Amino acid sequence: MSTDATGDYDERVTEEITVTVNGEEVTAEVEPRLKLSDFLRNECGLNGVRVGCEHGVCGACTVEQDGRTVKSCLSYAVQADGAEIETVEGLTDEAESEDGSLHPIQEAFHETHALQCGFCTSGFVMATKELLEENPDPTREEIEEGLADNICRCTGYQNIYEAVERAAEEMRE
Amino acid sequence: MKPAPFTHHRPETVEETVELLADLEDVELLAGNQSLGIVMANRLATPDHLVDLNGLEELQYVEETDDGVRIGAMTRHRTLERSDRLAALVPMLPEAAEQIAGPSVRNQGTLGGSIGEADPAGNYPAALVALDGVLHLRSADESREVTADDYFIAYMFTDLREEELIEAVTVPTDPFPPERTGMAFLELKRAAQTWPTVSAATAVRVDDPSADDPVLEEVRIALANAADIPLRVPDAEDVLEGEPLSEAGLAEAAEIVTDAVTPEGEMHADRDYKEEVAGEYAKRSLETSYERAIDGETQHGDTTC
Amino acid sequence: MSSSQPSETDDVDVEPETETESFTGTGLPRVEDRRILTGKAEYIHDVTPENCLHMALVRSMHAHADVVSIDTSAAEDHPDCELVLTAADVKAEYGPMPVGIPEVETDDGVATLEEWSLADEKVRFVGEPVAVVVASDRYAAEDVADLVDVEYDPRDAVADGMEAREDEVLVHDDVGTNVVDGERLEFGDLDDAFEEADHVVSGEYSWGRISGVPLETAGVVAQYDDETDSFDIDCNIQLHTLVDEMIHEPLGYDADDVRVNVPADVGGSYGTKIGIHRYCCLAAMASKELERPVKFNEDRLENLQGGDMHSSDREYEMRLAVDDDGTMRGLDVWFVDDFGAFPRYPVNQVLKPLSVLTNSYEIDHVGYEYELVLTNKTSQTAYRGFGVDPHIYALEMIVDEAAREIGIDPTEFRRRNLITPDQLPYTLPSKNIYDSGDYPATLDRIEEIIADERDGGLLDPEVVAERREEGKYRGVQPSVIIEPGVSGSDWTDRQRTENDELEERSRDEVDELPEHLRATVREDGTVQAYLATDSSGQGHQTLVSQLLADELGVLPSDIEVDYLDSVDAPTEYGSAASRMAVMLSGATVGLAERVGEAAERVAADHWDVSTDDVAYQDGAVDRIGGDESLSLAELAAVDAERDVEDRELTGVSYNYDHPATEHEEFDEAFTRKFPVYPTAAFGANAPIVEVDSRTGEVDILKFYTVRDCGTMLNPMIVEGQAHGGIAQGVGAALLEEFGYEDDGQPQAITLFDYLLPSIENVPEIEMEHTETPSPYTETGAKGVGEGGMIDAPASIATSINAALEPIGADEPADRIPVAPDHLLEKVREAEDESEDDA
């Protein structure tokens, strides 16, 4: 609680952190309680980090921290001090996107109609990235295990399997 | 779902950590933050201080000792799941680890976090109770060891003192030579994202895996989410030891388990149901462990049921 | 044709292979995808204007309690606090929110039912908002909310619909009863049918409280403009042109002064977000008070427990009158629907099943009776299926029960009673019409598929026997299920009209809302179209692009589709009730014709000839008998020279009329109070399930489905809708429920407890299609959005019944969701009975 009975309130204390976000170093003053998801969205403008449940179930806020996926709603920005973060925005090289090219995972999701409302999509793309980095040719069962931390309410997952398989094929080549 | 303000501490050493714990009031330890953060976001917990253990690289290890394995408290589920050494020596632990949620949760969640939280539905608490694990606790003043059996006292209440840190867990391997041992961690779980309805952790050692009917020399049975603490069921172990595994023995053990557990009912799994499936899952877990002991299979992951 | 492509419609480079081919009917990848995949899509949570403040709500933790006092002083003293509002503030300045049943007839006359955006005097469900706080950011707002001190005097609560009927605990004291509505309808000679039939079979079935639970929670950013005394409200409400009155009425403003705007991307709704007006009102009031933008993002806990977004919660008693030869003579339906604390969209949701009253079966004599009760739970909203899903489930359950009771194979029993193609169009006893299709052929096809699985597949007798040894029982039960498409607004009006007045009604008096679409040809020759509906993942921009491209003879990349807000758009129905495939395609075809005609007028005027001497084709107008031609870009340039009010190619609009109003077959239905849904998509499912008889766990091994939604405009999107609907049906059938303790405390306030199907829970879906065009719609398309959610739960439940038939379990799937504890209990009961028999 930030208050006591007499009505004296604590100053909002902040810490300075430096985080490499999609290859760029970001320095910011943040409250220790600021969630990594809110930091990325509000301080870094990376709205591709979607917030669906804030209790680590839906996976919409999944990002990579130092090469491993994390649910950014379950960690604090101060914990990312010194870390490298990659979000879905980092997947598309800006220069390339001008001519319309997407990351193979994004392209596969597009071609196979593996997204509808799209709110879960960033998380699925990031989870797929980690899965395929570790296992370039996953079976259906391995896809199931790899995406078990992400929930999609629209697609029934059928086309997500297709997308992952297509992306895997593309990335193996 | 935003937490109340707190002060964040990120010690680099265990020494520093226990000193912080000795000095600070109203502290929570932050490990993988797959549970505490949720309670804080709901403001059911509003600690003044969070001591973040993620800087304690010295607590991230899996090592073989003379009589067992020792695992640092900050070892991630993902590491446990993929440890060949654990798979060879105490395969129940990787099998318990790999069934926790999905990859991104397992990248973060830690062994010590799960034991510290002491949710009776958790996987490691039941596994450690089954395996006679020992917890290594440290404060600024002392280091002490507590058996898993003594550690879990009541619902999410443990022997861990406010100024103490869980440093490591050791699991004795003497009772379970891999060539005569089988272990299984079996969850009844309705969806990946939720807690298991019940889980059954079992380990068996047989006299001679190549015999026609290998005799059970040692049996361990522990249930998760079937009581206010992870529950070992020695009576069920006793009826099985000294005989080969039989239908009758399994049925009796399952019945003892069903009688022994005292679960809380929950939506879609009332108390009667959980009692019954605790017995059924104990039985299935035992069957798997026995098959694995006979097959000499030490790798986890080949659950036959 | 213009070579320049608008940047937003991006990467669509699919071209028809020949001149005669079209984009419509192909799986054109969606134009919505790129912005979503790159993280650039702007959902409501991403909208944060400069100077914006953040709102949080203080909510009741009691299911039922008197509010004794609210002390806001500590909250107001907090340095980050900008505003605290309570019911007293709201009542001083504003009105109550509209309720679905404003007046209830009681023994003492008529009692009024009011719902305020903040609870006044009494709280009626856990999570009901009691106070608003506004602060600099959401973190601070939650700090401030913690300081609002509400003193409650708790009361007994009622959290069960059947118990609420006893009126021992009253949710609304003044009303004097919890049963706020009810009606019995009879069609045909029900009594005769039941008296004469050889058998009368009855059963009780229960449908638990489930809902859509989109991944994106509700969100609103309200901005009050002091100069114009008006509001801009950005939010993710569904049907923003229809339900905007739910916002401007409580605010006490005209529709034109409350501009409701929905972003192009909404993170799922499935009906649920129709009911988020409370948040819109509160944010607007706070914004007016503070003269700054106020933002509110509902968090997941708020959403699950107090978000006004649960859906149907029913107890059914069904009776079926059947003859020895398996003829269904009569059906009698009785149910209670527990609406929670306030009736939001009640009557439509309990009456929509009348549009598919007897499902695919010919049953002439039908009774339909409901009671609508209030309890101490959060209020209902709409959810995919809108009350049809539980009806179909209960109906398919009583059909199963009857088949077993009279000793006919359940599939054969179904087949004998199917409506046959020669009967179509078929008028139901409740006067809605099934347009087209071949139900028996669909059942045949799904049976062929099952037969294949019986021969060396999942249902091979040897495999089934082996699994049974382990206590695992496999089974499947196909049935043909109808999805009503294209609701209308006239129905709501008819419900409020006296019967005799209705009978004298002519078709001209039918007041359905058309679908509005408009377009402007831009100077580069591309077309900017505007939707009057909102979307939440259905791919409407793609659909309009591909249809308009075909009709205008241009490329989809030459079309850009945007959205109108509630002020710029006419009042229209919007995206719900499986409408848009029909309504939007009809509107697009009509709009293209208008654009072509406008282009011809501009060209004719330019050349100073009659419009008979020019012809629009493929993005240009040609002069007949000459070489001259003007492209759309050139025509736009010509048009731009005119006075603004004379321009032909700006704001070309078309209103596609509701198809039922164009066909006299529906005239009779329009003189009754019952729903008219002019398209009937249909399908047959065969989910192969395996039930573990020792743990009550259900595994769906594979989900076969054969579906027909008429003409498929974009088969990829059609399949996606079916996949998603089926997955939601799997969740409903096996996992999801907003359970409540007896004292009204909710049991599912996190996603650890409200179990959305994860990738591991949804089986492989194998889908086939047939295409029987609707005779009533412009493109032959039928409504398709809700199908899977309507048919999958019934199919899964009856397949569980089939699986457990060998152990003599009596319709074990009699509760939705089919929870493992309940199923195990049913298995044990059956085992005990067979032991007793032995």
Image (cartoon, rainbow, N blue to C red):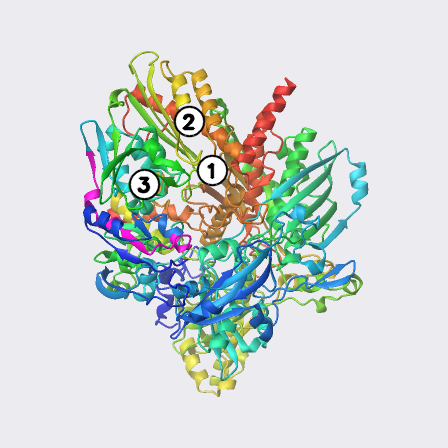
Classify mark 2: helix, strand or loop: helix
Q: Nearer the viewer, mark 1 or mark 3?
A: 3
Position of the C terminus of chain C, as image quadrant, is top right
Residue C234 image label: none
Write down the chain letter for disc 2: B
Q: Are marks 1 and 3 on the same chain?
A: no
Q: Amino acid at mark 3?
A: Leu
Viewed as shown, does residue A10 lie left or right of C60?
A: left
Tell me where residue A138 sits by quadrant.
top left
Magenta residues, start to end: B40-63
Q: Amino acid at mark 2?
A: Ala
Between the residue at mark 3 and the residue at mark 2, the CA separation in whole angstroms equals 29 Å
Residue B282 image label: 2
Classify mark 3: helix, strand or loop: loop
Q: Is B61 part of what is drawn in magenta? A: yes
Q: Amino acid at mark 1?
A: Lys
Residue B160 image label: 3
Between the residue at mark 1 and the residue at mark 3, the CA separation in whole angstroms equals 48 Å
Q: Nearer the viewer, mark 3 or mark 2?
A: 3
Comparing C348 with B87, the one in front is: B87
Q: Is C41 part of what is drawn in magenta? A: no
Can residue A86 be seen by looking at this rendering?
A: no
Looking at marks 3 and 2 on the same chain, the residue that comes earlier in the sequence is marked by: 3
Which residue corresponds to mark 1? C702
| Label 3 CA crowd tier, 10 Å (few <14, some 14–19, many 20+) | some
Between the residue at mark 2 and the residue at mark 1, the CA separation in whole angstroms equals 29 Å
